[in-house]
Amino acid sequence: MLEHITAMLALLGVLSLFCQWLGWRLRLPAILPLLLCGLLLGPMLGFLKPDAIFGDLLFPIISLGVAIILFEGALTLNFKEIKEHGGMVTRLVTLGTAITWVCISVATHYLIGFDWPMATLFGALVVVTGPTVIVPLLRSVRPKTELSSILRWEGIVIDPIGAILAVLVFEYIGVAADPTTHVLHALTSMLLVGFGLGTLCGYLVGLILRNNLLPHYLRNTAVLTLMLAVFVASNLLQEEAGLLSVTVMGIWLANMKGVEIDDILEFKETLTVLLISALFILLAARLNADALIRLGWQGLVLLAVVMLIARPLSIWCCGVGTSLSSADKWFLSWVAPRGIVAAAISSLFAIKLEKAGVAGAELIVPLVFLIIIGTVVIQSLTAGRWAKILGVTAGSSQGLLIFGASQFSRALAKTLKANGVTVLLADNNWDNIRLARMENLAVYFGNPASEHAENHMNMSGIGRVLVLSPYRQLNPLVSFYFQDVFGREKVYGLNNNDSTSSSNSARHQLSESYLRQLCLFGDAVSYSKLASLMAKGASIKSTSLTANFDYSMFMAQYGQSAIPLVYLQGGKVKVISAADRVALTSGVELISLIPRDAKPAAIVNITQP
């Protein structure tokens, strides 16, 4: 028996990895292969039986998994970023949630035959969307920046709100006598315990991190352990208050001044990916095939109500008085896939309701999964075409992601931004990111090729990548990752075959495929050369080439030591590489690096910058 359980756990890990890889390879949300895998192994083949494997431990595993997922999502909730997207997000997670809840609850009552308490519980479970499903969809669709931001932040904020709403409805169902008074008491206790303990522990953990009271290797483990302790303690003080506590704790840490949580986020990201993968397979494997079939046409009609009535009504009511166009609202009306929180919390409550003998409890999970599968599959396959019909796509992405926020990169980004080009700087070095933020540049602290970056880095308007970092071993990873995203011709890197490198042994050499990529700014330009020129006082200059001041005159003024970097022509951004032979004519805005001691050129080559 023990060997069987061990084998099933190992198989679960391998299948999780394969499904995540398959989702990445097919450019689809990983939830699709995960769900299909769980359905195949569970209801169809009867090979994977989570209840038999985990027994009484299944409920605690699901509970702790949901807590970690919500905590990781809360750590990304920076209020400054939410405010930038206006009042639409606030309306969606308040008024929009209420409208969606009422519409789905009423439809569930009349279509499925649930009594009103069970119908309102189901409505509360499926009001949530999720960034783990929405972000991959947005990457493939590429809508306008404001629409992408609204959907991304709605998915993050609404998760804990939906969880709290579901808990309150569950409390109402579980009490036979005077449920209203009980729910009011439970709500009061939940808010006091959740906000009180969450805020207190978030502040104390923040102080520990800010004052470096823990060695670096214990930071991630300590935060995870303390978070789980807060979750359990809150549930002991008030049943089901733990989810609110860990959410508040995460939000507090995300917004506390002087507390760096990026390394914690990276650790939680890895853990969350593992949990999401395993939970989806396990939860799908628990589905009752007969119950799913019993839903019949009524379940499909309910899916239609969720997609075609509840969501559009919510968007159009919340969009009153905003700057969103009709096309924007129609696009938002179509994109609201459900994700892991709905699946996990529904399974969590279904277990309790079935133990309590509540009628209809066995249909909760199949119905939730029907909504998840329907919204994810249909919207993933149609959102791109719908966005093009409405004309809300971002169009040709002329923006640049620059990996490496050195002095040169920051100067280039400032000049590009001044010329109306979208620029995002990414770096693992906090000092570089801090300096870039002080210069009001968009930044991402961390590895841009990570899973966390995929879910949280705003790539709206970005169409090309410049690898300008000194991290020789990380540069190939970033380059290959974005070559898969944008194509090989959209990723540029500096000449990395630098003879000044500290080691030329075979073990330190980069792969030939990486060295064959497009060399930025010419074969003679390396990171060390750019850093040296900037240290000696070189500057980034933007020059308008006209009939009266053409490229030959530019070179005559600044000499052959000037390094052309990028030029703008006809609303398009052209990155200069070693493979380019361009003729710079009038009407071009040339951005170049001018050494401090640049001298006039004796001979000018006007065809090759």
Image (spheres, grey):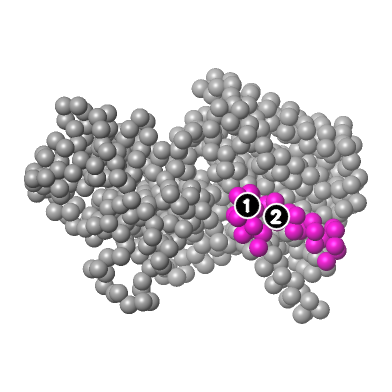
Q: Secondary structure at mark 2?
A: helix
Q: Nearer the viewer, residue 222 or 604?
A: 604
Q: Quadrant of the N terminus?
A: bottom right
State the separation of the CA atoms marked 2 and 1.
10 Å
Compare residues 353 and 101 and report the one nearer the observer: 101
Q: In the rendered view, would you say 241 is above or below 546?
A: below
- Select label 2 or label 1 by which is in front: 1
Where does the image place residue 514, in percent across and percent down from the top left?
41, 62
Q: Which of the 4 image quarters holds residue 11?
A: bottom right
Residue 177 appears at what percent x and percent y? 85, 42
Left or right: residue 317 versus residue 477 is right
Q: What residue is rendered at 88% in x and 42% in y?
A: 295
Residue for badge 1: 26
Up-down relation of residue 220 to residue 607 (above or below): below
User: Which residue is nearer to you in this view: 466 or 80?
Assistant: 466
Asked if 415 appears above or below 356 in the picture, the reply is above
- Tell me, yes or no, if residue 249 can be seen here: no
Position of 183 with respect to 603 (left or right) is: right
Answer few, some or many: residues within 10 Å of disc 1's Cα (few below 14, many 20 plus, some between 14 and 19).
few
Q: Is residue 21 magenta?
A: yes
State yes or no: discs 2 and 1 in contact (Cβ < 8 Å). Answer: yes
Residue that label 2 marks: 33
Q: Report x, y in % for residue 380.
A: 66, 42
Residue type at mark 1?
Leu
Looking at the image, the residue that sits furthest to the top is: 321
Q: Earlier in the sequence, mark 2 or mark 1?
A: 1
Q: Amino acid at mark 2?
A: Pro
Corner quadrant of residue 523: bottom left
Q: Tell me the magenta residue range.
A: 18-47
Label 2 Cα crowd, 10 Å radius (few <14 / some 14-19 / many 20+): many
